[in-house]
Image (cartoon, grey):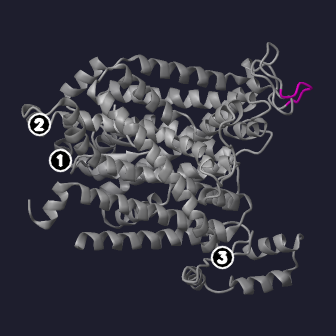
Amino acid sequence: MPYLIRRLASLIVVLVGVSTVSFALGVLAPGDPAELWLERALGRPPSDIQIQAQRQRMGLDRPLAVQYLTWLNGLRSGELGQSWGTGRGVFRELSEALPRTVLLAVAALTAAIGIAVPLGVAAAARPGSLIDHASRAAAVLGTSLPTFFLGYILMLLFGVQLRLLPVFGSGSASHLVLPTMTLGFGLAGVFTRVIRSNVLASLGEEYVLSARARGVPGRLVLYRHALRAALIPFVTIAGLSLGHLLSGAVIVEWIFSWPGLGKLGVDAIQNRDYPLIQGWVLFMSAVFAVSSLAADLTYQWLDPRVRLAKSGVA
Amino acid sequence: MAGPACPAGEKRCGVIGDRRVVPYAAPAVLSQITSTLRPKGPLWVGAGIVALVLMLAIGANAVAPYDPLSTGPAVLEGPSIVHLMGTDALGRDLFSRILFGARLSLGAALLTLLLIVTAGVSLGLVAGYDGRWIDTILMRFADVVLSIPSLILVLAIVGLFRPGLLSLVLALSGVWWVRYARLTRGLVLSSRERVCVEAARALGAGDMRILIRHVLPDVLRSIIVLATLDVGNVVLAVSALTFLGMGTQPPTPEWGAMINEGKDYLFVAPHVMLFPGLTLSLTVLGFNLLGDGFVDSIGAKESRLP
């Protein structure tokens, strides 16, 4: 499987690059981390001797390359430095928040696809109909409404006016509803348009014509033949939306106090928690890279043309 | 609106912002059909909104009824004749603040876009035309930057360095130009294979002349299309960052920051958050309609990507 190996190799190259960037951010940032750390710990400006001692303790007096490798080596012990805020290992903090972000992202993606598939097929079945126009309008709205504004509108509507759903925090399934809607809304609009145009395109293909000629009922042609072919390129689009989902999750989590990776990162930035910020950038990019790779491989596996061409059948 | 994904071997195809774009790939027949099918309405609505917002931003001094920073006794008051959009927690007139906020929000976004396009096009030109080591370095760098979700990288940069509107603009451009450089490079690669470039070379034209007279105009046509599609995204990105507190500091009026201030009174006085939010949404909608309509009207084919 040379393709998989090639992809894994490029994944490693990208991760090395990203880890360098994350590390460099901390080095290039103005201010001496040792001094900043002491200021936090002591609550007053530290003396020069204290700074010197702290620099030694943090390993800041060693060559950059050594610092970089020590930092990366922390991955093995689940450390990646220690958070200044909590004093716990950065890697541990991040991996504890990861499942909550994954839950939110998967919920939003599922909701978006669940809305987009029936709506997109309906729009493609009757181009120019009311449902087609409505879905187009919703798509334009979805890309224009800022996530943070939409989040507060939903909060007002469902949390305050209707008093149906909890507005902040996590814990129960109902806490997930508003963040999911906020994050999924923009995607649903875009996905609907993509499904629509893909179904429209595959409706013109010969296999659809031949299915019609064989007397397959219209609805079956639409769902079994046209939609199936339309879903394959859609996997790529969904994969490309992962970056959007991760960035969106940062804002949505912060608004709704959802304790995932996004909130952790923004809090770290507002606390100027250097090690946590560095680890956060690396971790988010790793999540992004790995999930993009997964989406790519799914696409390869789903499309019979690609799969067969590689195994030498077609 | 949405077209198929990038065809294999289509060098002019690229991903900008949230879209995959194939400028000038549509056959003439197709664009004729789509232009007759598609109403020009959205284009004019978008142009109208954008023109209105830009005029209000420029003329904020003349239009605004109050000083955006002066506080008053009427706190968290709803819309009335005296205060068109009501007042915020310090009794400042929201309408005036939104007008002056437009200057910062749009100014920052347009400056960012200008920086992105300038840096992206010039470096992409060099990389695409020169090939060799500049090209290799630039494209490897692009790979790394593009593999970090952009909002996250910008947040980290602004957070670690110094929060402020200017550093926000610089960080955002520093991350975003890469996409334009990559696309420009692709366009240059295909553009320099054209017959007219070959002819110019045969006539003895130098590299610089070919680059500026033949390749650049060709590239710019596509880049301008993409930039018009991207304005809305940049406005959104800027306001998202100021919303998270990475840009202006209070009491400066700026839309994202105003939404952030308004959220504290969401349940008491929702108008403090709603009016800046609505203005921002409407502006982004205007830019998106304008961009989409513009692309449709010149017959380029584009598809939105999430």
Callout 1: SS: helix
Report whether mark 2 lies on the same chain as mark 3: yes
Q: Main secondary structure of the magenta part?
A: loop
Percent x, y of residue B38: 33, 20
Percent x, y of residue B19: 39, 42
Quarter holding residue A260: bottom right
Query: Which circle marks residue A180 in the picture?
Result: none
Query: Which circle marks residue B198 in the picture?
Result: 1
Say few, some or many: other residues with alpha carbon within 10 Å of mark 1 (under 14 / 14 to 19 / 20 or more): some
What residue is shown with label 2? A211
Disc 2 from disc 3: Cα separation: 59 Å
Q: Indicate the amino acid at tag 2.
A: Ala
Query: Which circle marks residue A89 in the picture?
Result: 3
Res. B12 in view: no
Q: Residue at x 60, y 77 (%)?
A: A80
Residue B263 shown left or right of residue B185 in the figure: right
Residue closer to the observer: A226 or B65: A226
Quarter that holds the C terminus of chain B:
top left
Disc 1 from disc 3: Cα separation: 60 Å
Disc 2 from disc 1: Cα separation: 49 Å
Quarter holding residue B95: top right
Q: Indicate the amino acid at tag 1.
A: Glu
The answer to whether the residue labelled 2 contacts the one labelled 3, judged by CB atoms less than 8 Å apart, is: no
